[in-house]
Image (spheres, helix red, strand yellow):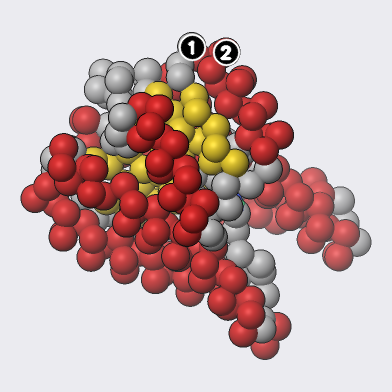
Amino acid sequence: MDLGLKDKIALVAAGSRGLGRAVAEELAVEGASLVLCAREARTLAETAAAIADNFGTHVLAVPADVTSVSDITRVVEAGNERFGRIDILVTNAGGPPAGTFDQITREQWEEATRLTLFSAIELARQVLPGMKERRWGRILNITSIAVKQPVENLMLSNSLRAGLTGFARTLANEVAADGITVNNILPGYTRTERLEDLAKMMAEKQGISAAEFSAKWEKEIPMGRLGEPREFAALAAFLVSERASYITGTSIQVDGGWIRSLL
Ligand code: NAD
């Protein structure tokens, strides 16, 4: 299937590693040019160079923190300057800290809101005018399975990603007639550095090995294994493609069957 992504320009936020990087790579395979941002300049530059070398595509790397409005402005302006437009926006950021309601401070709520909710809203705010003008656009938010089935001990993620889902569903209707789709993709337990670090940390706390701890996650997943970033990225590439032109306002999980609900 030709996804129609050749010559499209995609901004992938938090794209230096993990799920963001996997999405960037899949889009590069399909021939899209990329604008990547992440906080750490060195990792970002390495990722951008590797993608450009491996897939022969144009990659612009702009170090930026997505919690900063001025950083987002810099990224969008740099993308527009280099490529003339941004057709596709994939929002992403690091996950907010774990914890129950009693453990989370007011400051942590505010920081997490900037990271998980406002970053996606601001990115959308800055790319939408151009998409509307050209009457074509794709916005895809990376959220979490927590949106359909809250995960224990993840109060911030469960709450703020639900807020982002409400925003995206509302925006989808507001921009549908402009040829712009807005969707969310929900990763389940997927083997990224973050998940491996988390397994190590949790395992240490429980006095078991990281492999033993990962086995606990795998037991909850009908497929009996963690997901691979490429399996996640395949759906992301489809959802931002020309071929997904009539799909908007959806939230689709890539979770090996972890979410138990009907819809
Ligand atoms: P990761 O830690 O491997 O990668 C996160 C990326 O975000 C990195 O490139 C990092 O540089 C960048 N980043 C972090 N904070 C940033 C900021 N303020 N500004 C710009 N860039 C920033 O994480 P991942 O596993 O790829 O997860 C990506 C998102 O998906 C996270 O929000 C995570 O909570 C969510 N998620 C992941 C899983 C999973 O199993 N991997 C499951 C559910 C939800």
Name the residue: 68% across, 48% down.
194
For mark 1, does the 10 Å Cα neighbourhood hold few (<14), some (14 to 19), or many (20 or more) residues? some
Q: Amino acid at mark 1?
A: Gly
Labelled disc at residue 205: none
- Lateral position of residue 81 relative to residue 173, left or right: right
Q: Is residue 122 visible?
A: yes
Task: Kindly indicate whether the residue at mark 2 contacts the one at mark 1 (C-beta within 8 angstroms).
Answer: yes
Q: Is residue 52 left or right of residue 90?
A: right
| Residue 187 placement (x, y as % from top left) | 49, 49
- Element carrying mark 2: helix
Q: CA distance from mark 1 to mark 2?
A: 5 Å
Q: Nearer the viewer, residue 110 or 260?
A: 110
Which residue, as the protein is rendered here, is positioned at the far bottom? 102
Can residue 190 be seen in this snapshot? no
Displayed quadrant of residue 208: bottom right
Instruction: State the mark number for residue 56.
Output: 1
Q: Nearer the viewer, residue 104 or 130?
A: 130
Instruction: Give the vertical position of 249 relative to 35 (above or below).
Output: below
- 167, above or below 89, in the image: below
Q: Which mark is residue 53?
A: 2
Q: In the image, is 154 to the left or to the right of 197? A: left
